[in-house]
Image: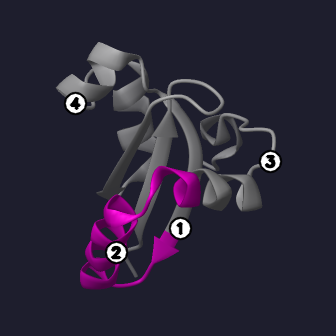
Amino acid sequence: MRQYFVYILASKKNGTLYIGVTNDLGKRAFDHREGRGSIFTARYGVALLVYYEPFDRIDEAIAREKELKKWRREWKIELIRTMNPEWNDLYLTLQL
């Protein structure tokens, strides 16, 4: 069964944030790290994978992405802190 992910990238702790959705978290995070993920992430150096959520259905993942994008910045930061209080780069812990 295919899995989908909503993810948040950061430039640094409490830095610039980017929210996205993908069906291949490892590849997508790698692309961002290499400056190929998006113009925005390349321009602002947003490459640290600091949060992600798995979903079984793409429509649920897209709905969650849209929901998170509407959230206030403080809420997003608190969400990151619940999963990753040190803002570690979770890309390094992915089982690829």
User: Is 30 displayed left or right of 43 in the figure?
Assistant: right
Whichever of callouts 3 and 2 sits on the residue coming sooner in the sequence is 2
Label 4 close to label 1 by CB (< 8 Å)? no
What residue did someone put label 3 on?
85
Give the class, few, some or many, for how many residues have Cα within 10 Å of label 1's Cα (few <14, many ≥20).
some
**Would you say residue 73 sits in the magenta stretch?**
yes
Element at badge 2? Answer: helix
Element at badge 3? Answer: loop
55 or 87: which is nearer to us? 87
**Would you say residue 75 sits in the magenta stretch?**
yes
Element at badge 4? Answer: loop
The structure residue drawn at horizontal position 41% and vertical position 17%, both measured from the top left corner, is: 45
User: What's the distance in space between the residues labelled 2 and 4, CA to CA?
Assistant: 19 Å
**Which mark is on residue 61?**
2
Whichever of callouts 2 and 4 sits on the residue coming sooner in the sequence is 4
70 or 2: which is nearer to us? 70
Q: In which quarter of the image is residue 39?
A: top left
